[in-house]
Amino acid sequence: MEIHAVIMAGGSGTRFWPASREARPKQLLPLGTTDESLLAATVRRISGLVPPDRVYVVTNARLREATLAALPGVPEANVLLEPVGRNTAPCVAWATVTVARRAPDAVIAVLPADQAIANEQAFTETLGRALDQAARGTITTIGILPTRPETGYGYIEAGDPLPPHGRRVVRFVEKPDRARAEAYVASGRHVWNAGMFFFRATDMLREVARHLPQVHAGVTRIDEASGTPRAADVVREVFPALPSISIDHGVMEKAAELAVVPGDFGWSDVGSWDAAWDLAAKDAAANAGGGEGVLFVDASGNLVRNLGGGARMIALVGVKDLVVVQTEDAVLVIPKERAQDVRAVVEELKRRGRGDLL
């Protein structure tokens, strides 16, 4: 089994403003439990299964230099540059046709670039089972065993066993309300959709051709021009015209048979500053981000990130459950429970024409 990996790294990460900017989005930030970026951690975690020359990264063209700098071991030719974002189906299809040209019998792992994993050994073992399942001809995903009735994630309903490692996917479920999320967790049949997919290249291209023929035709044109003087021009011409659709809606929900392999390895989608607090080391009062330049007095449950704020001290006194992020040109203060609302700041800055802060 020749394994290749495709890392989806085109996100903007607006919920992590002011640390996340258009030129340095979420996946390029150290938001997990170490000082390495989420993208670098994603590639490092799979190094025992996939060598760097078989890792492909799909990202926005404007992030080329930053992405290459974050991944010095990945060949430049393996970084596919989208002129515009078109959601995950065109991303996965383009990467798959690229891998198939170089390794027709490849089994591919598609992974998001912006997740955190606490138990890396269990993660590697689960990936091995998912890849083995996919190598037998069934497109496979990993479902995270839920630890709470989460309303911010999509779910997968799992059915009968599908040997050797999976269960049949009954359906994908959109983000539920609280009552349905509680019912899903109680049922034992539902897992969180982590957006990881595993397949033989030939199997995925067959499904894309069947369900998304315009995407298939477009990425085939791009691949045929690869290595020619017109390659970049063809990408700029063809890719923006592809339909913007997720791989979940475009292919996975329509495929005749899918397998889901359950996983339990301390997964987080690192979706907000609140999630970053969950992952961080904390003091006795549950404050995270202390140390040089940060002072907590009678404060609890706070997250502070002093990023490029110079010598200015950040002191929190008598407050709890806040997120405070300081950069060279901006300061964010927000209750942890409203961490998702950071996107509203980005939208307001766009409305005011403050591109210098985006």
Image (cartoon, rainbow, N blue to C red):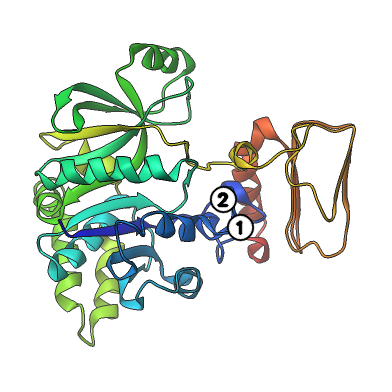
Residue 243 appears in view:
no
Residue at the disc numbered 2: 14
- In the displayed structure, 156 sits above or below 293; it is above
Query: Mark 1: which secondary structure?
Result: loop
Give percent across and percent down for residue 174.
Answer: 36, 28
Disc marking residue 339: none
- For marks 1 and 2, the one nearer the N-term is 2
Amino acid under disc 1:
Asp
Residue 57 appears in view:
yes
Residue ID at (38%, 58%): 85
Amino acid under disc 2:
Thr
- In the displayed structure, 160 sits above or below 249; it is above
* Quarter occupied by residue 277: top right
Give the total of numbered labels: 2
Residue ID at (42%, 25%): 146
- In the displayed structure, 165 sits above or below 347; it is above
Quarter holding the N terminus? bottom left
Give percent across and percent down for residue 315.
Answer: 89, 46
